[in-house]
Image (cartoon, rainbow, N blue to C red):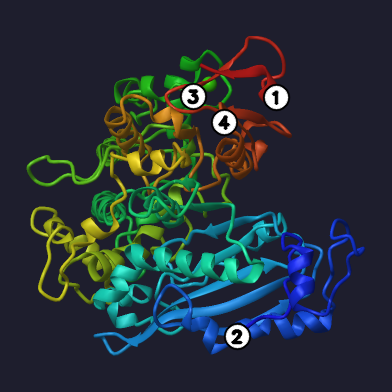
Amino acid sequence: MTRSIRPSRLISPFLLCAIASACGGNGDGTSTLPVPTAAELVASCPGLSATALAAALPVANTTLATATLVDATVTAPQHCQIDGEINRRTGTDGQSYAIRFRLRMPISAWNGRFFMGGGGGTNGTLVDPTARLAEGYATIGTDGGHDNATNTVAAAGGTAAFGLDYQARVDFAYNAYDQVTQVGKALVEKFYQQGPKYSYFVGCSEGGREAMLMTQRFPAHYDGVVAGDPVLHIPLGPLNGLYTTKLFAGLAQRSGLTLANGDPALGKTYSDTDLLLFRNAILGACDALDGLNDGIVDNQPACTTALVSAKLAEVQCTSAKTDNCLSADQIDTMKIAYVGAINSQGTSLYSDWQWDAGIGGQNGSAYNPSWRSWWLGSYASATNNATKLNFATAEAVIYTTPPQAVSTADSLSYSLNYNFDTEPIKLYQTTGAFPQSTASMTFTDAVDLSRFKGRGGKMMIYQGASDSSVSIKDTLRWYDAMNAQMGSKAQDFARVYVVPGMAHCSGGPATDKFDMLPQLVDWVEKGVAPDSVVASATNPGYFGVSSRTRPLCPYPKQTRYKGSGDINDAANFTCQ
Ligand SMILES: [Ca+2]
C-alpha cells in the first residue's frame, strides 16, 4: 500500500504536497512543514500493518500485529507504535515460539537515529526502551525469541524451558537481535521515507552481551554500542554459580547452618556484618593504593590476594565466632571462591575474581542488585534465594548439549551434584539436533574487531568491579587480548570503564549512576572521544556523605585525586 501521510519533518514538503492533501507550507517550499491532523495520523499509522507492507520487509515471515498512534505524554512524544513478530512456529518441544518486537517512532520529534535496547537474564520479556523515545530516538526491543508468559515450564527449568528447542536457542543466542534490527530499520525507512542516519545499541548484562554481539557477529548494524557488564561467556557465569553453590553449601554444612527443610543455608554462611569485615579488610589493604582513603579501590591491579589475605588474618577469630571476627573456614572458603571455578585438575573453567570493596556495604536493605544476592542470597531468608540458583537450571536446559530438563525445584540438588570434570565439556559439544554448541553460539569474546572498527564503529563498555555474576577480570582479559590483536589501538574505537564498588549493572558502594550514550553519540558523530565519564553515587550514604561524583576512566587508566579540593566532586579527579 501507499501511505498518504509522511509525518516527519525530514520529509520534503514538496514530496508530501505532491502525494497528499495536507499542504501546510508557505507556498515557497521553504518554511513551515505540514503538520498532519490527528485524524490523518490515526489513519496513517495503523495503515502500516497492511499485508503488502509486511511482504516487503527484509525478513521472511514477519507479521505486523498492531500499529497505534500513541498520544504524547509528559515522558514521551507522540509516536507510532508497531508491535510485530517474526517466524511464528511450533518448536520441536511442541511450544509456540516467535521473535516479538516493539518499535516506536516519534511523529515529529525524530532525531534521525535508531536505538535498540538490550535484554536481561535469559530474556523472554519484551524490551521497550521508552526512555530514549523521549530523546527523539526511534526505539526498538525484542523478547529474544521466546515468551516467559507462555513458554515457561517448571519441569524444564521454568523460563529456561526454551532451551529444549534448538531454533529458540539460536534466536536467543544471536538471531533475534539481528532480525529485529533488520526489520526495525526497514520500518523506520518506510515510515520516514529515509533510513536512520545513525544506529545505537545499549544494554547491560545479557543486553551487554547483545551489544558485544553487534560489534562481532553483525558489525554493519550499529554505529555505536554501550555494553554494560557484558556477559562474554554466558554459560560460564552460571557454571561458576554452580561451583560457589557447592562451595558455600560445604561451609554451611560444616557450620551447622541448615534450613527447615534440611538444605544447606547458603545465605547464612556470611552475615551482612561478616561481609562488612571483608569490605573493611579489602579497604585496609587497598584503599590507599590509589593515594586516597575514600572507600573506593581505584588501583585494582595492585589489590592482590596476598595483600587482602594479610588484612583478613587480622580479623580471623581466635576463639568463638562473633560479629567482630571471621572464622578461618569463612576466610578460606571465600578465598577459594575468588580463585573461581576449577576442575579436579585445577584448570580454570571461567575466571578468577577481583577483590573489591563492593563485597560488603549492603546496609541490610538493597539485596538486588548487590554482591550477595548473586553468590549467597539474603541472610534472613527462610529459603535459598541466591540469584545464581535461578540460572542453575539455565545451565542444564539452555547451555548443555543435549539439553537436560531439570525442574526449577531441583536447582539446588542439580548444583550440588554437578560434576566439574565431566559436565562442562557439554557447553562446547554438539549433536545432530543441536549442530552448534552454546559456546560457539553465545560467546562474545572475539578479538578481531576490524570489521566493526573499519565501518567507523565505536564501543563503550562499563562494568562493576564488584559484579558477582560477571567477573571484571574476564572482561579485562578479553580487552587486553583484543587490544593486542588490534595493534594496541583498541582505544581508538573501544574503551572499558571499570566502576569500583559497583555490583551487577548498578548498586553497591559506588558512583554507579551515569549515561554513556550522549558521549558515545559525540564519539560516533563528531569524533569526540570519551576520555572520562562523570558518574554519581546512587547511594552516597555508603560513603557517609550526601553526594559524590567521580570520573570513570578508560582502562587501563585509573581515577586519581588531584590532591586538593572536595573529594566528593569529580572535578578534583583525573584519569591517569
Ligand atoms: Ca581509594
Q: Nearer the viewer, residue 235 or 568?
A: 235
Q: Which is closer to the viewer, label 3 or label 4?
A: 4
Reading the image, the residue beneath label 2 is 1
Give, as a three-letter code, the residue at label 2: Met
Q: Nearer the viewer, residue 416 or 554?
A: 554
**Image location of residue 55, percent across then percent down:** 47, 83
Count neighbours of disc 1 (C-alpha within 10 A) and say few if under 14, some if 14 to 19, many if 20 or more. Answer: some
Dot 4 falls on a residue whose secondary structure is: loop
Dot 2 falls on a residue whose secondary structure is: loop
Would residue 290 be found to the left or right of residue 109 on screen? left
Give, as a three-letter code, the residue at label 4: Pro
Lower sequence index among marks 1 and 2: 2
Q: Is mark 3 within 8 Å of ligand 1?
A: yes
Q: Which is closer to the viewer, label 4 or label 1?
A: 4
Reading the image, the residue beneath label 4 is 530
- Against 426, is 562 above or below? above
Reading the image, the residue beneath label 3 is 298
Residue positioned 54% across, 44% down in the render: 362
Lower sequence index among marks 4 and 1: 4
Give, as a three-letter code, the residue at label 1: Asp
Dot 3 falls on a residue whose secondary structure is: loop
Residue positioned 36% across, 58% down in the render: 388
Q: Which is closer to the viewer, label 1 or label 2?
A: 2
CB-based contact (under 8 Å), mark 2 and mark 3: no
